[in-house]
């Protein structure tokens, strides 16, 4: 079972933070979900339960680079069809499940859609 963790993009401050900052202290899951009603200033991203080749945690909204033979492709990590997927509209086999071993061995988080949107172009 993977740990349930989130990070949050602060829309006002334009920086990545930890949702515990919203409460100012550790919180229970009940407090967390009740607090989501007032979290309009934050964009939450859930931890996928996976790490990249450098052991960096992978979250929704991350930009993920995967090497394939001599080439590479850039994907966005997205929750889609009931699972975390790698999505790139330009790549034929996009929308692949993130859990595939090739992604762990050959992939790395290179940024996220809020701080590094230019990486998706």
Image (cartoon, rainbow, N blue to C red):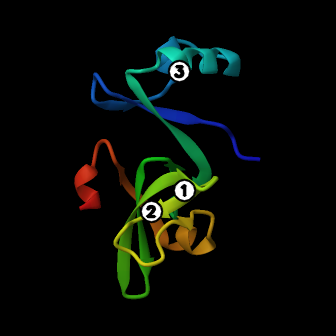
**Category of crowding for the residue at label 3, using alpha-carbon neighbours closer than 10 angstroms: few (below 14), some (14–19), many (at least 20):** some
Q: Are marks 1 and 3 in contact (CB under 8 Å)?
A: no
User: Percent x, y for residue 73?
Assistant: 37, 73
The answer to which of marks 2 and 3 sits earlier in the sequence is: 3
User: Percent x, y for residue 4?
Assistant: 66, 37
- Marks 2, 1: nearer the viewer: 2
- Marks 1, 3: nearer the viewer: 3
Name the image quarter holding the C terminus.
Answer: bottom left
Q: Is residue 6 above or below residue 69?
A: above
**Category of crowding for the residue at label 1, using alpha-carbon neighbours closer than 10 angstroms: few (below 14), some (14–19), many (at least 20):** few
**Category of crowding for the residue at label 2, using alpha-carbon neighbours closer than 10 angstroms: few (below 14), some (14–19), many (at least 20):** many
User: Percent x, y for residue 88?
Assistant: 39, 66
Figure quadrant of residue 104: bottom right
- Cα–Cα gap, marks 2 and 3: 29 Å
Q: Nearer the viewer, residue 79 or 64?
A: 79
- Cα–Cα gap, marks 2 and 1: 21 Å
Q: Secondary structure at mark 3?
A: helix
The answer to which of marks 1 and 3 sits earlier in the sequence is: 3
The residue labelled by disc 1 is: 55
Q: Is residue 68 above or below residue 96?
A: below
Q: Secondary structure at mark 2?
A: strand
Q: Is residue 117 left or right of residue 57?
A: left
Residue at 42%, 77% in the rendered image: 67
The residue labelled by disc 3 is: 20
The residue labelled by disc 2 is: 87
């Amino acid at each position: 079972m993977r740990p349930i963790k989130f990070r949050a993009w602060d829309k006002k401050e334009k920086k990545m933070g930890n949702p515990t900052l919203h409460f100012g202290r550790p919180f229970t899951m009940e407090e967390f979900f009740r607090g989501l009603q007032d979290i309009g200033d934050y964009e939450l991203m859930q931890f996928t339960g996976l790490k990249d080749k450098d052991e960096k945690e992978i979250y929704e909204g991350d930009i993920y680079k995967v090497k394939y033979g001599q080439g590479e492709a850039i994907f966005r990590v997205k929750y889609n069809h009931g699972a975390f997927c790698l999505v790139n509209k330009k790549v034929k086999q996009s929308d692949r499940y993130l859990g595939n071993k090739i992604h762990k061995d050959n992939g790395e988080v290179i940024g996220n859609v809020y701080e590094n949107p230019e990486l998706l172009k």
